Image: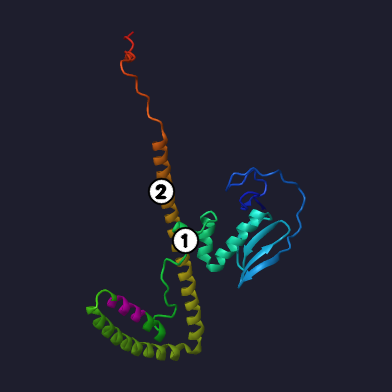
Amino acid sequence: MELCARCGEQVADGAAQCPTCAFVLPPQTGSIQPAETWTALAASGPLVLGQSEEQFAVYDQQRTYGRWPKTDQGYRFASEAYAAHSQSLLHGLAYTSAGYQDPDRLGLPTTPVLKSQTYAAPLSFIGSFRRIAAWASKFAKRSPARAALGWTLGVIAILLTWVFVACWYFVVFGLFGIFVIPYRLVRRSSRKTQHIQETALATQQAMLQQQQVLLQQLAQQQQMMTAHSAPPAPSPPPGAALPPATEPPPPA
């Protein structure tokens, strides 16, 4: 794999041009390149802006978010991408997908589309309380008259649910003992991972939809500009004879 000198995207070995920007690549030689040595230029938690002898990169312990050639323009792209990813992962993805432009200015979402949710088990004191409280709060926001009814039903539901959860704990821990604790921790981690993946997917879909809307608006603006800039058809001068209308050829 090598990097495109224009856009910095990775290109497969032996490719004649970059699949992203169609830049014609120079012919490759058969020499074996040594392993790159990276130097950290900046770091924000696990996120690192690094450089090697030939390129810049933004990466963490799990993935690489972009590589750019070691030029002034490559450093600008790398530093801006690093700053965007430092704000949040979604902000960095929106910045990169928007062609290194500010996603907030373009109207792209940089916050999770899906709301946060609790990762505690439904059959637990914390999990049941958070879910019932969220339902009561949503029910109360519909109208002030429903606020008292919603929170009254919520408090009753919490008390009844906690009684059921206490009985559930007594039965489960009596049957399986302390083996229930690691199982619940694994289940909680699984729910958290699934929610993070769903949030990232929903946000990326919203970004793509917003980009399609922007592209359609730009295409409509270009069509309107082209229609206004087209010169009108010349009209014949007054008194000029019009050319005779062509007649169809006689049948054979």
* 73 in the magenta segment: no
Q: Would you place residue 189 above or below residue 239 in this image?
A: below
**Residue 206: image x %, image y %?**
43, 59
Of 218 and 19, the residue lying toward us? 218
Q: Which residue is mark 2?
A: 217
Amino acid of disc 2: Gln
Residue drawn at (38%, 81%) of the image: 130
Amino acid of disc 1: Asp
**Residue 57: image x %, image y %?**
64, 61
Residue drawn at (30%, 79%) of the image: 136
| Disc ID at residue 46 | none
Q: Is residue 124 visible?
A: no
Helix, strand or loop for disc 2: helix
Label the magenta part by its dominant secondary structure.
helix
Disc 1 versus disc 2: distance between alpha carbons?
Answer: 17 Å
Residue drawn at (50%, 89%) of the image: 178
Of 89 and 188, the residue lying toward us? 89
Of 115 and 178, the residue lying toward us? 115
Helix, strand or loop for disc 1: helix
Of 174 and 65, the residue lying toward us? 65
Sequence-first disc among 1 and 2: 1
Tell me which segment is drawn in magenta: 131-140
Q: Which residue is mark 1?
A: 104
Q: Are marks 1 and 2 in contact (CB under 8 Å)?
A: no
Q: Would you place residue 225 above or below residue 59 in this image?
A: above
Furthest residue toward front: 238
Tell me how many marks there are: 2
Q: Is residue 191 left or right of residue 96?
A: left
For label 2, the crowd category at 10 Å Cα-Cα, with few meaning under 14, some 14 to 19 and many 20 or more, is: few
**Residue 203: image x %, image y %?**
45, 63
